[in-house]
Image (spheres, grey):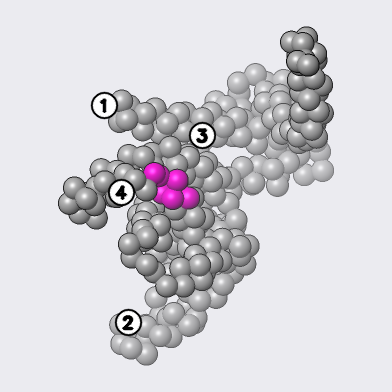
């Protein structure tokens, strides 16, 4: 006895109802903790609202004055440049090493021993809190720290090198810490993408006499493009939100000469001084820049694919 189409449709609709019910916790969480704060931030960006000593100024509607003041001060572009430099210095070696490790671990022809152990080890730095990582590096690279002691003992330097007093060494330390913390996570993502590629393609390439380099650049990389786009966009978003490592490492000063001051550290200064109008304007601009750069990355990779 066959079930009529109307009964089958009713049964499907009942199942769909449970899907919507299970979505309610996520929707409520998103609205309360993300959508409402986002709208409130945009709203505050149009008001003069800060504390001067014990006196509260505002909230007074000022329109786009907070945005004009933000660009007029000139700090925004300097801190954006600092943020992007430190992100690029950390991301480029991160993606290169992750691609190399992912190719090794996913290549069944190499028959690597204890690969599971090494996968766990390279992911471990991602589990350490960034603030703890920064404190560790602050102690290691201090003027009287172990790194300087080692370099002095082997005769590389004649006096302690002030790592946190030179622009590029300080930026390099921030970038190196971000690299160490995130290359394991990136490796796991890229390796998952590589393992999802049909093994028949690699077997056919091997039969045709393709070298490892040809297989990697002609088969693996093109098919890995969706994962690479995801990794680049998420890393870019994380880079623009860089805060905890330079905050702890430089004691919130962004020294030397504010060369390690990031946009989120600048935002934190406004929030600490309770200047909610300027903080809201900076957050909105950062949101727009993040969206534009993410769109450029996405479109750039898609254009290469179509070409």
Whether residue 274 appears in magenta in the rendering, the answer is no
CA–CA distance in space, label 3 to label 1: 26 Å
Residue to which mark 1 is pinned: 307
Q: How many other residues sit within 10 Å of disc 4, few (<14), some (14-19) or many (≥20)?
A: some
Residue 69 spot, x, y in % from top left: 56, 29
Dot 2 or dot 4, earlier in sequence: 2
Q: Which residues are magenta?
A: 192-198
Q: With respect to residue 279, does 183 lie above or below? A: below
CA–CA distance in space, label 2 to label 1: 51 Å
Residue to which mark 4 is pinned: 202
**Visible in this render: residue 43?**
yes
Residue to which mark 2 is pinned: 157
Element type at mark 4? helix
- The residue sitting at 37% across, 48% down in the picture is 199
Dot 3 or dot 1, earlier in sequence: 3
CA–CA distance in space, label 3 to label 2: 42 Å
Whether residue 196 appears in magenta in the rendering, the answer is yes
């Amino acid at each position: 006895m066959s079930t009529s189409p109307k009964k089958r449709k009713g049964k499907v609709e009942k199942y769909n109802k449970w899907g919507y019910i299970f979505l309610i916790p996520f929707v409520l969480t998103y609205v309360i903790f993300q959508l409402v704060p986002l709208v409130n931030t945009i709203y505050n960006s149009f008001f003069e609202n800060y504390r001067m000593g014990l006196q509260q100024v505002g909230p007074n509607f000022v329109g786009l004055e907070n945005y004009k003041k933000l660009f007029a001060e000139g700090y925004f572009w300097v801190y954006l440049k600092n943020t992007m430099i430190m992100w690029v210095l950390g991301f480029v070696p991160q993606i290169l090493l992750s691609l190399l490790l992912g190719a090794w671990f996913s290549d069944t022809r190499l028959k690597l021993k204890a690969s599971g152990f090494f996968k766990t080890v390279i992911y471990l730095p991602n589990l350490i809190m960034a603030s703890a990582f920064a404190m560790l590096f602050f102690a290691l690279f201090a003027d009287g720290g172990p790194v300087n002691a080692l370099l002095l003992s082997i005769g590389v330097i004649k006096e302690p090198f002030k790592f946190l007093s030179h622009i590029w060494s300080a930026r390099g330390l921030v970038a190196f810490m971000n690299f160490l913390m995130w290359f394991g996570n990136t490796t796991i993502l890229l390796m998952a993408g590589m393992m999802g590629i049909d093994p028949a393609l690699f077997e056919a390439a091997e039969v045709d006499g393709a070298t490892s380099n040809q297989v990697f650049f002609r088969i693996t990389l093109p098919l890995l493009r969706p994962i690479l786009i995801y990794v680049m966009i998420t890393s870019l978003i994380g880079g623009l939100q860089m805060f905890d490592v330079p905050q702890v490492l430089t004691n919130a000063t962004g020294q030397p000469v504010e060369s390690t001051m990031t946009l989120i550290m600048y935002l934190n200064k406004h929030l600490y001084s309770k200047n909610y109008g300027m903080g809201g304007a900076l957050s909105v601009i950062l949101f727009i820049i993040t969206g534009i750069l993410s769109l450029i990355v996405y479109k750039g990779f898609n254009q290469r694919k179509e070409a």
